Image (cartoon, grey):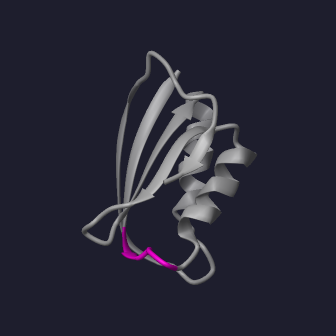
Amino acid sequence: MHKVIINFSGRVQGVGLRWYISRCAKEHNIKGAAQNLPDARVQVIGYGEKNQLIKFVKQCTRGSRFSRIDHVMSVWGEADHAPDYFIIL
């Protein structure tokens, strides 16, 4: 099991990005969460098999229809456990 933490900056809050990411997570069987951060970024924590996470990250970086992603920072690692769902916080 692998984990990725992704931080998106740009026009990423209030534009449906977290909902888009949630749909991507369901498509790729990714568990975790997406949340708005106080500094206007969106953070995603995803858990799953590495090949599925790679596809998930690639699709997420396209962004939602009204978003504009200026910068993406990803941190990869191993995960001992994962939640049973993907949630929007």
The quadrant holding residue 16 is: bottom right
- In the picture as drawn, the residue positioned furthest to the left comes out as 39
Q: In x, y percent, where is residue 3? A: 45, 32
Boundaries of the magenta span = 9-14
- Tell me which residue sits at (43%, 22%) in the image: 79
Q: Is residue 28 above or below residue 37?
A: above
**Position of 46 compared to 43: left or right?**
right
- Tell me which residue sits at (53%, 33%) in the image: 47
Q: In x, y percent, where is residue 54? A: 55, 42
Q: In x, y percent, where is residue 37? A: 32, 62
Number of labels in the image equals 0
- Tell me which residue sits at (62%, 46%) in the image: 55
- Tell me which residue sits at (56%, 59%) in the image: 60
The quadrant holding residue 35 is: bottom left
Q: Is residue 76 above or below residue 12?
A: above
**Residue 10 included in the magenta stretch of the image:** yes
Q: In x, y percent, where is residue 21? A: 59, 58
- In the picture as drawn, the residue positioned furthest to the right comes out as 27
